[in-house]
Amino acid sequence: MEKSIFGIQIYDSTNEMVDNGTGFIINKDGYFISAGHVFEIEENKYFAKIQNIKVPIKLIHTEYKNQENQVSPYYMDLVIGKLCLNSIEIKPLKFSKSIEIGAQYFACGYAKTLLIPNDKKIITEGELFADDNDEYFKDDLKYNQLPYKVTSKNISRFFKGNLIIFENGFSIKEIKFNPKGLSGGPILEQKLIKGMLITIDNCIKSEYIVKILDTKKIEYYLI
């Protein structure tokens, strides 16, 4: 899937890699989808790591609010961007709008690889159960494909005692461990995009993503 899904490397003003996310390609011109919170800090620099090549990113559309400021009916956490690919070969993924409760889908993307100075052991963050102020990022990413089951056709949150429903997302339950860094990655069934991962248990629906793509007149492929 390295021609379709890529890691996003995030650097601060000192050019140190401080975080990462995932994106996926949706058309032959290099347009991609990711999560809005991956690009939350404007001062940071963002690059795609695709086929082991660092590629500049241009943002086309951003919608993001932190969890405390989300307002129904739409959960705002989506980025549309474009990669400056030059001669890099890509393979766009195709969308599917259907979602079935109980179905098993796969969250795909690139997890962080961390070096912990305490013991010099390289581990994925999925194996790290507590934050460590001494940890720092290495400039490599590990591809993961993790199974999930759909638990609801919307996202529901309790906020200040009120139940809030977001109709542009769906909920999943993890089956296996859940490394961070997959935010913005596709939720796939047989290589078809069912949605995009935004939290450990929530996704934005393909149906909503293609609706936004239509408003921007951006080409995509739908099954």
Image (spheres, rainbow, N blue to C red):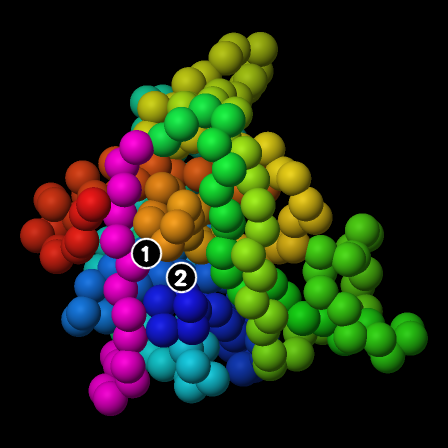
Pick the residue in front: 82 or 177: 177
Badge 1 local density, few (<14 within 10 Å), some, or many (20+)?
A: many
Predominant SS of the magenta segment: loop
Badge 2 local density, few (<14 within 10 Å), some, or many (20+)?
A: many
Asked whether 88 falls inside the magenta stretch, the response is yes
**Residue at x 62%, y 55% (from the top left corner):** 180
Q: Is residue 135 above or below residue 148?
A: below
Query: Answer yes or no: do the residues labelled 2 and 1 have beta carbons within 8 Å?
Result: yes
Measured as percent of width and height from the top left, residue 88 is found at 29, 85
Residue 209 - label: none
On screen, residue 22 versus residue 3, left or right, reads right
Please name the residue that numbered disc 2 is placed on: 23
Please name the residue that numbered disc 1 is placed on: 33
Q: Outermost residue, front direction? A: 190
Query: Which SS class for mark 2?
Result: strand
**Residue at x 78%, y 57% (from the top left corner):** 128
Query: Which SS class for mark 1?
Result: strand
Look at label 2 and name its amino acid: Gly
On screen, residue 49 versus residue 140, left or right, reads left
Badge 2 or badge 1: first in the primary sequence = 2
Q: What segment carries the magenta color?
A: 84-98
Picture quarter containing residue 160? top right
**Does any portion of residue 41 appear in the rendered image?**
no
Q: Outermost residue, bottom direction? A: 87
